[in-house]
Amino acid sequence: MQALSRLYGAIPGVGPAIENGFYHDIALPSVASAKEGHSEEEKISLEDLPKIEKEMRKIIKENLPIKKKIMPIDEGIKFLKDKGYLYTAELAEDLKAEFARKSPLQETLAGQHENLPLPEAAARQAEISFFQQGEFINMCKGPHLKSTGEINPDAFRLAKIAGAYWKGDEKNKMLQRIYGVAFETKKELDEYLKMLEEAEKRDHRKLGKELDLFVFSDLVGKGLPLFTPKGSIIRQELERFIVDEETKRGYLRTYTPDIARVELYKKSGHWEHYKESMYPPMNVDGEDYVLRPMTCPHQFMIYNSRPRSYRDLPLRYAEIAHQYRKEQSGELTGLIRVMAFTLVDAHIVCRPDQVEQEFEQVVDLIQYGMKTLCITDYRYRFSKWDPSNKAKYIDNPEAWEATQNSMRKILEKMKLNYVEAEGEAAFYGPKLDIQLKNVNGKEDTAFTVQIDFALPERFEMVYTDQDGKEQRPMVIHRSSIGCLDRTMAFLIEHFAGVFPVWLSPAQVKIISVSEKHIEFCERLADEFKSNNIRVEVDANDETVGNKIRKARAEKIPYVLVIGDKEIGSGTLHINIRGQKEIVEMEKNEFIGKVKKEVEERK
Ligand SMILES: [Zn+2]
């Protein structure tokens, strides 16, 4: 920050340490004073980063001592304002307001803002801490090194620049966020940069474009992916796989609409606890409709459409369901965070005595799905409610405790290695989440199993027991292979675009040596197609070498070159993806090989 202040007179926003480094939000003076839309905004660009790094190294060399200063809060605010540090001054004002509201000993501020001083000590004395190095001074809770000279000048790098709304609020000014990475040694830095480079190569947004799997259109809108024919093949294969597997495991399929009357979601509790994630209602002929954020209430109406006996349960309703949830536009990321998505969803309505077994079977299905998709790096998270958040959760502490306890018992019995997370549950019950990391190390929920104690009651769902009495069933919400969009993002990155044969958009590419071979190529392709093998013919007027290179770039598993020799002998010469030597094979043997790989999902 000191370097930015020296070079640009930059005004600091927040600037915390993060995993493997730090970031700092800044505004340049002209930006900060500009009236909305009336001035050319000066910005720091990527080309400026080396210059800033150079200044940082200079500051390290100056070996400036880093000193802590404590100021009474009002004096601190005035000091910041006089310096023109309007953002940190605002944080100090917030802090002061917080002091006024909260009892001095509460620790509620802990960890909210990196720039805030330690809450307890500061609250008692209403003071804020500053750190000074050389001519640069700013409010900060610390801790810091003793001097700038302790930093290894060869082990840090400014990595990237992004936009960040002040306080994360879209209504506020957009600041520039400068990210840096920092390590103790140059070797660690180099290794980290290499990993980043690898991650960039695997990034699903980049590969999605290169391999023509999905696109976005400004006219359609942000966060609304359009799957191309190639991407749709992968998606369809995933759907086929899971529909067949779920059918084997006793699931029944439903199709229900993407919209519903808002009344449905008022009854379910979504309107009360989940409205922030829902799109606003559409009024049609005086009736309000909403896009559905979940499938559950729709399927519950099917359950309620006729009387159910204890013998009918469990009923496992499955649907590949389109759903719509609002995301802040800053949160939208490729296929991982989108505005409209497709969930491989299901709701199991069962008797209370069946919950444990059903839960275990769902986890088994998820594990089977992950094994088939070659996902090995994941983590179980037991997501619980937050008793202090009445807006987000159904207020029934007893039911929460009871359901969480029985879920914990099941997890212990299954010997799953899980972490617990408070405030991550669904509004109607606790969840077991399976967490995956994307190439950039960010973790997201991929698959989930939830026990619901609340919605069966809200929808008055019942079954008749052995004695003819009405009983309340339980519901398990689950997704087996998750949200197809997000799962595809993980798979693209996991395989780096080199999909197994069963998922490859084109499994075989046939290349003609010259024009006279094209007809034979077409006939061969037809034969492959009749064996359900996905095949493309490259009959372009280019060199064979060129065509092979292109097929390799498309990461097609098998490439066949057809010339006089192949037509004469009836033997195929096969370029296998990832192998140097060309393999010779009879046509039928090759067809059998590909079919077997697809069948075994390899
Ligand atoms: Zn559900």
Image: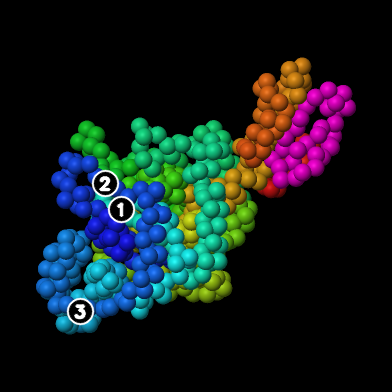
Q: Residues within 10 Å of mark 3 (few under 14, many from 20)?
A: some
**Residue 42, which numbered label?**
2
On whether residue 562 falls in the magenta region, the answer is: yes
Q: In what element is the residue under mark 1?
A: strand
- Point out the tag, 2 or 3, that comes first from the N-terminus: 2
Q: Name which residue lies at 14% across and 69% down.
A: 79
Cβ of mark 3 under 8 A from ligand 1: no
Which amino acid, by three-letter code, is at mark 3? Ile
Question: CA–CA distance between discs 1 and 3?
Answer: 28 Å
Disc 1 residue crowd, few under 14, some 14–19, many 20+, Cα 10 Å: many
Query: Could you tell which of marks 2 and 1 lies nearer the N-terminus?
Result: 2
- Total number of numbered discs in the rendering: 3
Magenta-highlighted residues: 557-586
431 shown above or below 209: below
C-alpha separation, residue under disc 2 versus residue under disc 1: 11 Å
Where residue 384 sits: x, y (%)? Answer: 39, 68
Q: In which quadrant is the N terminus drawn?
A: bottom left
Q: Element type at marker 2?
A: loop
Q: Residues within 10 Å of mark 2 (few under 14, many from 20)?
A: few
Q: Which residue is mark 1?
A: 176
Image position, residue 569 (x, y; %): 88, 27
Confirm whether residue 327 shows in the render: no
Q: Helix, strand, or loop for circle 3?
A: strand
Residue 78 belongs to the span the image colors magenta? no
**Residue at left offset 85%, top offset 26%:** 565
